[in-house]
Amino acid sequence: MKGRLPRTLMTTGGMGIGGAETHIFELSKELASRGMEVTVASGGGVYADELKEYGVKHVEIPFDSRSPADILSSYRKTDNLLSGDSFDLVHAHARIPAMICSRAARKHRLPFLTTAHLDFKVDPITRRLSRWGDETVAVSDDIKDYLVREYRLSPESITVTVNGVDLERYSSSLPADPSELIPPPPKGRRILSVSRLDRDRSHTAFLLTAIAPDIYPLYPDSDILIVGGGDDMVRIRTGAKAANELIGREYVKLLGPRTDIDRIISTADIFVGVSRAALEAMAAGKATVLSGDQGYMGVYTTDKLLAAMENNFCCRGREIASPNELKNELLRLLAMSDDELKKLGDMAKETVEKHYSVKKMADDYLSVYSHLLGQHL
């Protein structure tokens, strides 16, 4: 491969809405823009087709299934994909594809890299089945500590990167979407939350449905948008329906899983959530309340930067928000002047510009790729 960039196979469970999925999407886009040949293999999802617009190939492999038949099928398809000198590097982003790809990469004598996005619960079975790469990338310092503690990985084999955000895409100067796919902004302020709405990630979305009837009487010209999909949608829909029936109109709006998050964020004034979604809202200059299933840190201000960076803006290790806690924080923000809210948004945007660019994330990965391949990229 002398004289060219490595041909890289990235693998993950699926390419639906989620922080890890967007991380892969942005990384693949950036590497492709630098001339690298990138192929993503996954079980599919809303981002799979969009990858093609940026010159990134997608191959459907059922890495999102735990059934023995699908695991065997995934191995055979991966083995076939790696045959014939098609790739120089294999990069897995989730537990099942890592288990499958570690074996396939070893068979084809290819360097193998893993990225750890979450601190999954560990038991004797998952510890035994988990596979880590020749080197591993962690998206935060506390994930690195988790890998060293739970899997006894060498600290020297782990590189910490960031969840890079496309600053141009999430510019606060984006025009409003002319279509009817996004509800027009209310006369007052819009509260937005974006998340995968699985049972272990839907706490904040459900809280918003619970406190909506208390917010509406004080700020009837506002509204709440919740974006995402997952296995807890029935509970979220039920909560939103109950809130809207009490209020007497559709105050809480559920948009489902979407890829036009940049456009949706551009219509909001206040964001509530964690991780990559929070960073994207911050990049757009929105006042951001950090609240998720692993903890609560309240409105982001620069004095919280180091603590937030340590846990990838996920609030790990903190107490989760109570309904009153989140309600009072949102009421405080809704009562602020435009200038006060803008100041919080500008502070958030400056943080992302300084610490969380896609360029930095891609540079970190290329450094690891260089080390694995024994050449400067």
Image (cartoon, rainbow, N blue to C red):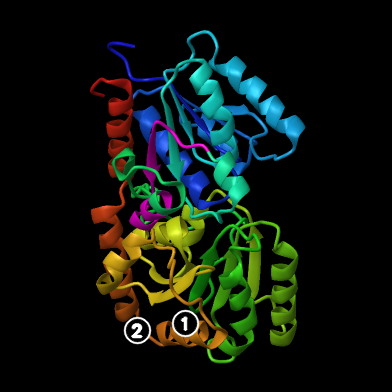
Residue 137 lies within the magenta run: yes
- Placement of 298 over or under 124, stated as above or below: below
Quadrant of the drawing holding the C terminus = top left
- Residue 220 seen anywhere in this rendered image of the structure: no
Q: Amino acid at mark 2?
A: Ser
Q: Amino acid at mark 1?
A: Leu
Taking the image as shown, residue 82 lies to the left or right of residue 206, namely left
Task: Depth check: give the residue in front, 185 or 152.
Answer: 152
Taking the image as shown, residue 112 lies to the left or right of residue 247, namely left
Picture coordinates of residue 348, whole percent (x, y): 31, 66
Q: Which residues are magenta?
A: 131-147
What residue is pinned by disc 2? Answer: 337
- Placement of 135 over or under 57, stated as above or below: below
Picture coordinates of residue 280, whole percent (x, y): 41, 57
Q: Give me the disc on residue 330.
A: 1
- C-alpha gap between disc 2 and disc 1: 13 Å
- Residue 273 seen anywhere in this rendered image of the structure: yes
- Placement of 62 over or under 281, stated as above or below: above
- Which numbered disc flags the more N-terminal residue, 2 or 1? 1
Q: Give me the disc on residue 1.
A: none
Task: Depth check: give the residue in front, 34 or 124.
Answer: 124
Crowdedness of circle 1 by 10 Å Cα count: few (<14), some, many (20+)?
A: many
At 66% from the left and 20% from the top, the residue drawn is 76
Mark 1: which secondary structure? Answer: helix
Mark 2: which secondary structure? Answer: loop
Q: Quadrant of residue 372?
A: top left
Residue, far bottom: 218
Picture coordinates of residue 71, whole percent (x, y): 69, 31
